[in-house]
Amino acid sequence: MQDEDDMSQLSYGNDSALDTLVFRYHKLLYGYAYRLLRMKGWRRILFRKPF
């Protein structure tokens, strides 16, 4: 129920609620981003040369 409260607070503009959620789930978020970047297509899109 605490996540729902944090999401509700976030919708009202409470930035500390986002900090709380990121702190709580940072390992899961990092793992998800890492798996996405391992895919060849995502690496090419994120790290391509600007010109």
Image (cartoon, rainbow, N blue to C red):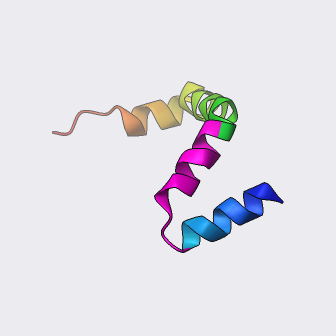
Pick whichever, 25 or 35, lies toward us. Answer: 25
Examine the rendered structure and indicate whether residue 28 appears above or below residue 18.
above
Pick whichever, 44 or 6, lies toward us. Answer: 6
Examine the rendered structure and indicate whether residue 17 appears above or below residue 45.
below
- Residue at figure coordinates x 59%, y 34% from the top left: 36
Residue 37, given in percent of the width and then of the height, sits at 54, 30
- Residue at figure coordinates x 61%, y 37% from the top left: 23
Residue 42, given in percent of the width and then of the height, sits at 50, 37
Q: Answer with left or right where residue 30 lies relative to residue 14.
A: right
Image quarter where the N terminus lies is bottom right
Boundaries of the magenta span: 12-23
Q: Residue 15: within the magenta?
A: yes
- Residue at figure coordinates x 46%, y 31% from the top left: 43
Residue 39, given in percent of the width and then of the height, sits at 58, 30
- Residue at figure coordinates x 48%, y 69% from the top left: 13
Figure quadrant of residue 5: bottom right
Examine the rendered structure and indicate whether residue 10 appears above or below residue 30.
below
